[in-house]
């Protein structure tokens, strides 16, 4: 590090901490942006909750380019932000490079495992939650055909799809699952029009429940499902409220809790791998006043039983990431 | 006779356009309740006030030089190559394959080999649109932009299904081996006693980019081929009459253009990320169009314009880090510069020409 560099970091730190004496935590959003109604927004919600409860402030940045990943990490670390939370697996390799240079700073990365002494890696068992909503979808479906609309075709989304198919087949071995990915570029996360088109195409093939794991594209999926009189399933955040009575349930991935916990722990953040699954409430499905009429007691009992079995380890949902294959189609 | 002196065309018009864009940006920043003067200071000190800032600025500059040159070369043959994005993407694939599968023990060997891989793959991606234009008359603008999407799809398929290490969440290749890591400006300048920031990604590719500027200048203005390209660009019938083969020139100009765009991958894939990620190019191919427009399709103009855009990128990053100016607004500022220097060129040119004409009459 050069003198200039040091001076710069120090000056920035001074400017930042003028108001707050303690180390501020920082949150870095992925390229999708803060208000994506999904993953990044969940992280933002967690941070806001922490800020409102404690009255403290935090730093945040929405990235614009890949090269900024390492840059943002270093600048925040040099400015004394602690802990620094990253929303997204894509920070993995940048964090790998940076973590050792700032041994006194605690980092938390979501959706990725980074093996460093000062890093907490938060990973979610999305396949478990997708399994549960897959069961619900197959039980609710009258046609025996359910749909899945993914965002960008990347391993993480295949993990969602694979869990969903397993759940649907578990509830109804004859169920047909139609799968579509929206696209192959990051634009696939924000294309509600195409999401609606894919949903309509799936409906024409007989699907009457459609699950999305597609970020902003999912808004179109849920809209099309509601318009066409079938049921949608939300993802990440509770999206039941978007079309009351038309969204069967939402697969909950509590990114907000992960951020909230990391911020609350502050500089005492425990490092290591933290797996958020059904067992510890990091993953689940949503029932509220918007969808309780849709889910019968029988369905709920079956899903809760499966959830309990997954939590106890009796039932293992295959994880696509483990071997890049899915046992069922 | 020219309507105005050359210095006015080359320097005054871009400068006035820039000032207009800056003025409008200041109003926008003011409107959201931030201090524009503080924002400017933060951008300048963040991008140019330290070797760290320079390191990032020059890193972006290197990307934009290559894509800017790519557009400029094609433009001299009156071909509008907007496929720089896809060509650079494929260039990344060439770099990745070379770095991962060829035994390259040292960067001195790895750099030329990867550069050849990048240029070949980039040129190959320009080959089909070039052929369709030359032989079938399919408009190059349409075909090159469609090839951007095909490139994204192809790369996605390869990264997700073939090149991704098993069990990895990220659709990206493995890290390149140690021997292929390019020295950063820190490594290059340390032996001669200059302290340069270690964290910044600018690397030896910047030197390659400068050489590329020189090579393109030599090609266009000092070789027979360059003369043919320019003649073809000025008037196809005249070029044909002079015995220049339009098919050949179209193909060659596009291959050089694609190769230059592909070379960008040496900087971002090999120099910075040291692995191939899905959106490695991130719009640099499109920025190249603005860079070429602003640089008047001259290699040295491209260099200056690329530096400006590098400054805007790095300065914008600093704004995003330390202020509450949202990133969308930073894109607005960058877009205003493109708008004024590229699209609204005539808005400044017309009145200036009139002024110069009246000055001349008066004299």
Image (spheres, rainbow, N blue to C red):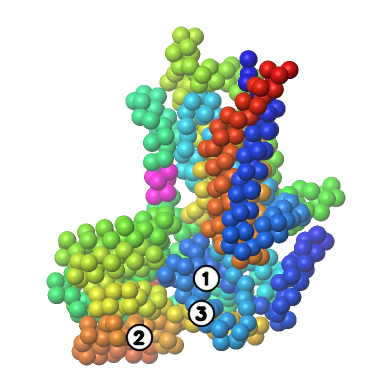
Q: Is residue A114 at least partly visible in the picture?
A: no
How far from the left and from the top, in percent, is residue B36?
67, 57
Q: Which residue is mark 2?
A: A310
In whole angstroms, how far apart are the C-alphas of marks 2 and 1? 26 Å
Residue at the image position 29 percent from the left and 82 percent from the top: A290
* Lower position in the chain sequence, tag 2 or tag 3: 3
In whole angstroms, how far apart are the C-alphas of marks 2 and 3? 26 Å
Compared across the picture, whether A144 is left or right of B37 comes to: left
Residue A46: numbered disc: 3
Mark 3–mark 1 CB contact (< 8 Å):
no
User: Is residue A223 shown above or below B333?
Assistant: below
Residue at the image position 60 percent from the left and 86 percent from the top: A54
Q: Main secondary structure of the magenta part?
A: helix
Residue A87: numbered disc: 1
- From which residue to which does the magenta span run? B148-154
How far from the left and from the top, in percent, is residue B220?
60, 23
Q: Secondary structure at mark 1?
A: strand
How far from the left and from the top, in percent, is residue B39?
68, 58
Q: Chain of mark 3?
A: A
How far from the left and from the top, in percent, is residue B158?
42, 52
Q: Secondary structure at mark 3?
A: helix
Q: Which image quarter holds the C terminus of chain B?
A: top right
Q: Nearer the viewer, mark 2 or mark 1?
A: 1
Dot 3 alpha-carbon crowd within 10 angstroms: few under 14, some 14 to 19, many 20 or more: many
């Amino acid at each position: 590090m050069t003198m200039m560099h040091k001076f710069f970091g120090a000056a920035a730190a001074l400017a930042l901490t003028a108001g707050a004496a303690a180390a501020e935590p920082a949150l870095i959003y992925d390229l999708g942006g803060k208000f994506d109604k999904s993953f990044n927004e969940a992280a933002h919600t967690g941070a806001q909750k922490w800020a409102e409860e404690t009255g403290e402030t935090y730093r945040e940045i929405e990235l614009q380019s890949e090269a900024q990943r390492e840059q943002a990490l270093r600048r925040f670390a040099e400015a004394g932000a602690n802990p620094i939370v990253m929303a997204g697996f894509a920070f993995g390799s940048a964090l790998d490079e940076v973590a050792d240079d700032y041994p006194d700073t605690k980092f938390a990365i979501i959706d990725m495992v980074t093996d460093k002494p000062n890093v907490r890696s938060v990973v979610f068992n999305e396949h478990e939650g997708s399994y549960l909503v897959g069961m619900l979808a197959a039980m609710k479906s009258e046609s025996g055909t359910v749909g899945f609309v993914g965002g960008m075709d990347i391993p993480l989304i295949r993990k969602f799809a694979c869990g969903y198919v397993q759940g649907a087949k578990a509830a109804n071995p004859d169920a047909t699952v139609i799968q579509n990915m929206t696209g192959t570029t990051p634009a696939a996360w924000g294309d509600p029009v195409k999401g609606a088109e894919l949903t309509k195409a799936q409906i024409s093939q007989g699907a009457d429940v459609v699950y999305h794991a597609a970020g902003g594209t999912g808004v179109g999926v849920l809209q099309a499902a509601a318009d066409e009189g079938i049921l949608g399933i939300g993802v990440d955040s509770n999206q039941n409220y978007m079309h009351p009575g038309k969204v069967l349930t939402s697969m909950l991935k509590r990114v907000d809790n992960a951020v909230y916990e990391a911020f609350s722990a502050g500089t005492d953040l425990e490092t290591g791998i933290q797996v958020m699954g059904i067992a510890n409430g990091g993953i689940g499905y949503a029932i509220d006043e918007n969808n309780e009429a849709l889910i019968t007691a029988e369905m709920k009992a079956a899903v809760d039983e499966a959830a309990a079995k997954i939590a106890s380890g009796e039932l293992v949902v295959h994880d696509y990431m483990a071997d890049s294959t899915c046992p069922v189609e | 006779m020219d309507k105005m002196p050359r210095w006015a065309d080359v320097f005054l018009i871009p400068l006035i356009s820039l000032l207009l864009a800056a003025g409008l940006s200041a109003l926008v920043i003011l409107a959201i309740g931030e201090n524009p003067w503080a924002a400017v200071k933060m951008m300048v000190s963040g991008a140019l006030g330290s070797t760290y800032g320079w390191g990032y600025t020059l890193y972006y500059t290197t990307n934009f030089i290559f894509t800017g040159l790519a557009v400029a070369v094609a433009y001299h043959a009156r071909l509008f190559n907007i496929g720089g994005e896809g060509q650079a993407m494929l260039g990344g694939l060439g770099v990745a394959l070379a770095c991962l599968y060829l035994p390259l023990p040292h960067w001195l060997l790895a750099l030329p080999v990867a550069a050849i891989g990048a240029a070949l793959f980039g040129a190959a991606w320009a080959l089909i649109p070039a052929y369709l234009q030359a032989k079938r008359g399919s408009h190059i603008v349409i075909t090159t932009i469609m090839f951007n999407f095909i490139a994204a799809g192809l790369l996605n398929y390869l990264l997700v299904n073939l090149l991704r290490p098993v069990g990895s969440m990220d659709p990206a290749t493995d890290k390149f081996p140690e021997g292929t890591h390019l020295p950063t400006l820190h490594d290059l300048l340390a032996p001669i006693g200059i302290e340069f920031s270690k964290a910044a990604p600018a690397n030896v590719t910047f030197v390659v980019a400068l050489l590329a500027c020189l090579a393109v200048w030599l090609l266009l203005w000092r070789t027979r081929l360059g003369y043919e390209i320019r003649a073809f660009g000025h008037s196809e019938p005249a070029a044909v009459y002079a015995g220049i083969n339009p098919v050949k020139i179209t193909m060659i100009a596009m291959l050089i253009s694609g190769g230059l765009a592909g070379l960008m991958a040496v900087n971002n894939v090999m120099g910075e990320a040291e692995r191939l990620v899905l959106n490695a190019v991130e719009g640099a191919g499109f920025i190249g169009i603005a860079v070429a427009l602003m640089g008047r399709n001259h290699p040295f103009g491209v260099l200056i314009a690329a530096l400006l855009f590098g400054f805007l990128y790095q300065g914008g990053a600093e704004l995003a880090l330390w202020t509450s100016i949202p990133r969308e607004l930073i894109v607005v500022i960058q877009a205003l510069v493109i708008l004024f220097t590229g699209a609204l060129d005539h808005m400044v040119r017309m009145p200036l020409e009139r002024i110069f004409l009246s000055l001349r009459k008066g004299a």
